[in-house]
Amino acid sequence: MRVFFKSLFVLASMITILLLYVVVEVVLAMCAYMYLALNHVETFGTLISYSRDVLNLFANQLEKLSPELANRAYTTLLGELGPKSILLLLIGLIVGALGRLVSWLVRRWIHGARLGLPSSIR
């Protein structure tokens, strides 16, 4: 019974950590988006135009793949999404990838330090 409660506690703590990580990712992505929009207007405009190209590319590929599905997507998903939404999604992906990279490097560094490995091998 003790093992069951320990496993349940570990599961609950891991789910909590993952939820906190997602919240931190969303907040960081929004902060990066607002920073670009407020402080680097030209860069933000350029990124919006690139995001429009990404959205158009996605829509064109979807139209080639299935015209009927593309029509439904335009009335629901693609019609609602604009270039700014796509930019926010892409910034979120980049922030998430960088966060996972940093956490992986930290875990690797901690694991290497625990094993007593030299820093060049970690």
Image (cartoon, rainbow, N blue to C red):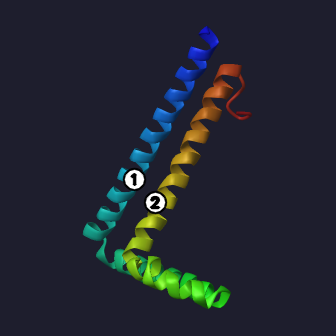
User: How many other residues sit within 10 Å of disc 1, few (<14), some (14-19) or many (≥20)?
Assistant: some
From the viewer's side, name the closer residue of 70 and 107.
Answer: 70
Helix, strand or loop under label 2: helix
Residue 86 rendering spot, x and y as whole percentages:
44, 73
Residue 119 rendering spot, x and y as whole percentages:
67, 31
From the viewer's side, name the closer residue of 112 and 31.
Answer: 31
Give the quadrant of residue 69: bottom right
Counting every numbered tag in the picture gives 2
Q: Is residue 110 left or right of residue 121?
A: left
* Residue at figure coordinates x 37%, y 75% from the top left: 84
Residues tagged 2 and 1 counted as in contact (Cβ below 8 A): yes
In the picture as drawn, the residue positioned furthest to the left comes out as 38
- Tell me if residue 56 can be seen: no
State whether residue 61 is above or below residue 107. Answer: below
The dot on residue 110 is none
In what quadrant of the picture does the C terminus appear? top right
Residue 37 rendering spot, x and y as whole percentages:
29, 70
Q: Gap between marks 2 and 1, in whole Å?
A: 7 Å
Mark 2, residue position: 92
Residue type at the position of mark 2: Gly
* Residue at figure coordinates x 53%, y 21% from the top left: 9
Mark 1, residue position: 26
Disc nearer the start of the sequence (2/1): 1
